[in-house]
Image (cartoon, helix red, strand yellow):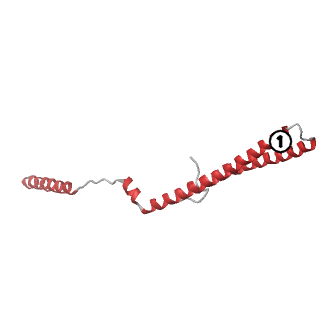
Amino acid sequence: MKKLALFTLAAAVFAGGFASSASAQTRVGTVDMKKVFENYYKTKDAEQRINEDRNAAKKELDDRTESYKKAVEEVKKLNDEIQRPELSKEGKEAKSKQRDEKVTDLNVMHVRSRNSSRRVRSSSRSAQCGCAAGSWTRS
């Protein structure tokens, strides 16, 4: 019985000493993920690519907007010419035909612009996440 009590006492002392030395070695640290992410070289490369793509898309959008505005002005000008009373019937028909062609061109331009912007957004998202174009799905 004395041996059992002595053994239990020795085990308790040993376990207590081991637990206190183990806790003294445990360290807790924190990592500033924002700083790590900002300083990672691939982040800077990706930001540069995104900015270049954004600038190119903005330039393309500005060019398309400008050509769209010019075409709208041409349609307005043709409408004004059609309304002129001194214009003959044949002249009005010719101007109406030109105007209708311009309106059709405007509609085509609008649809292409919408489809192109969707495609650009899709490929941009794919490039940002590292996916193949079109392989991601919305949730």
Circle 1 sits in a helix, a strand or a loop, which is it?
helix
Q: How many marks?
A: 1
- Which residue was labeled with disc 1? 81
User: In this image, 89 relative to 116: left or right?
Assistant: right
Q: Nearer the viewer, residue 63 or 41?
A: 63
Side of 93 relative to 52 (left or right):
right
Q: Residues within 10 Å of mark 1 (few under 14, many from 20)?
A: some
- Seen from the viewer's position, the closer of residues 43 and 51 is 51
- Name the spot of residue 97 as percent of width and height, x first: 86, 46
Q: Position of residue 79 (x, y in %)?
A: 81, 40
| Three-letter code for the amino acid on which mark 1 is drawn | Glu
The percent coordinates of residue 93 (x first, y second) are 90, 43
Q: Residue at x 8, y 56 (%)?
A: 3
Say left or right for 43 vs 88.
left
Q: Nearer the viewer, residue 52 or 124?
A: 52
- The residue lying furthest to the left in this view is 2
Between 47 and 136, the one lying in front of the other is 47
Q: Residue at x 33, y 54 (%)?
A: 31
Q: Position of residue 56 (x, y in %)?
A: 59, 57
**Residue at 37 percent of width and 55 percent of height:** 35
Q: Quadrant of residue 26?
A: bottom left
Left or right, residue 89 beside residue 62: right
Q: Which quadrant would residue 55 be assigned to in this image?
A: bottom right
